[in-house]
Amino acid sequence: MPSQSKDLYLPRPAEIREVIEENSQIKTFALSFIDREYQDRFSYAPGQFLMVSVPHCGEAPISVSSTPVSGGAIHLSVRRAGRLTAAMHGMRKGDVVGLRGPYGRPFPMAELAGRDLLFVAGGIGLAPLRSVINTCLAAGHGRRITILYGSRTPSDIAFKADLTSWGETANVSCLLTVDRAEPGWQGEVGLVTALLAQCRLEPDDAKALLCGPPMMIRAVLAELAERGFADEDIITTMERHMKCGVGICRHCHMDDKLVCRDGPVFTLQELKQLKVMELLG
C-alpha cells in the first residue's frame, strides 16, 4: 500500500493547451503542468491513468491517451458522462484542472515486442490503446499490427486523424465498423467481432489488446478463444468506480485485487483466476 504522504491527494494544476473535438461526446485535452520543472520530469506508461479534478465538480480517473516517448503535452480523452466530464467539456484553452498520478499497472510493453498485435476497441475504448499503438510505432515495431475499431455511427468515430495515419502506415491494417450507417458511409456495418473474420493472425505468435464496452469485450473474448488465443495473450482493461486511485479506500476491489493498484490492465488469465468474468457483461 502506498505511503500516506501529506500530498497524496493533492492535485497539481495543469493548463489546457489545446482542445480537440473527437465527436459530439468525446474531446481530447492536451495539458501541461503549470510547474514547468515538474512537467519536464513527469513520466507515465501506456495504460496508466490520472485522477482529474475540477473545483466543485469532483474527481475522476481518466486514461492517458498520449504517447510517453513523444514528451510534450499530456492527452486525456474525455467522454461526457457526468458532472465532472460535462464541466471539462465546457472548458477551453487556458483553463486549469487538477491532476494527480499517474496510477495503475500499465500494459506490458516489453511483452509486445516481437509479436504480431491485434487491437480491438469500441468508442472511447480506443483512448488507452491509442497510447500503446503510437508507442509501438514510435519504437519501430516491425511486426504486423491490426486495429479493429467499432462505433455506433460514422459520426461517432473518434480519433479520425490517428485512424487515417495508422491506415497509411506499413505493416498496419486498420478496419472500421459502425452499428448504424449514415448517408455516404461505404464501410462495414455490424459488430466489431465481424471484422475478426478479415484478420489473418497466428494466435501462437500474437497478442490481443481489448478496450471498450463490456458486452463488446465479452464477445471478442469468445471469438479469440475460438481462434486459439491463450488466456495470457489476451489483455484488457477493467473499469471500476475509483475514489482514491492509490489503493487506500479499496472502493475498486475485485476479490483481493484493486483495479487502481493491480490494474486497470489485466490478462484474461488473471481475470479468470479472480472469478470476475461476470463484470464483462
Image (spheres, rainbow, N blue to C red):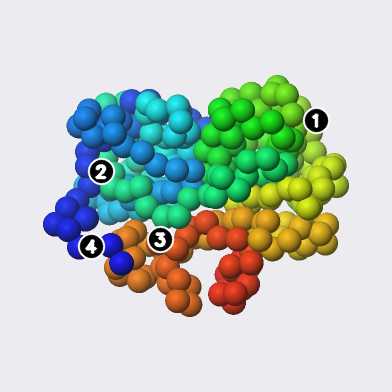
- Looking at the rendered structure, which numbered label has been put on residue 260? 3
Say what secondary structure mark 2 lies in.
strand
- Looking at the rendered structure, which numbered label has been put on residue 238? none
Packing grade of label 2 (10 A; few <14, some 14-19, many >=20) is some
Indicate the quadrant containing the C terminus: top left, top right, bottom left or bottom right. bottom right
In the picture, residue 2 is in which quadrant? bottom left
3D distance between C-alphas at marks 4 and 1:
54 Å
Q: Nearer the viewer, residue 87 or 225?
A: 225
Residue type marked 4: Ser
Say what secondary structure mark 3 lies in.
helix
Q: Indicate the position of residue 92 as horizontal and vertical percent values.
A: 32, 29
Which of labels 1 and 2 is toward the front? 2
3D distance between C-alphas at marks 2 and 4:
21 Å
Residue plotted at (76% across, 48% down): 205
Which numbered disc flags the more N-terminal residue, 2 or 3?
2
Residue type marked 1: Gln
Residue plotted at (45% across, 43% down): 45
Dot 4 corresponds to which residue?
3
Say what secondary structure mark 4 lies in.
loop
Q: Is residue 250 left or right of residue 137?
A: left
Which numbered disc flags the more N-terminal residue, 3 or 1?
1
| Disc 2 + disc 3, Cβ < 8 Å | no
Is 95 above or below relative to 56? Answer: above
Which numbered disc flags the more N-terminal residue, 4 or 3?
4
Q: Indicate the position of residue 252 as horizontal and vertical percent values.
A: 41, 68
Packing grade of label 1 (10 A; few <14, some 14-19, many >=20) is few
- Looking at the rendered structure, which numbered label has been put on residue 186? 1
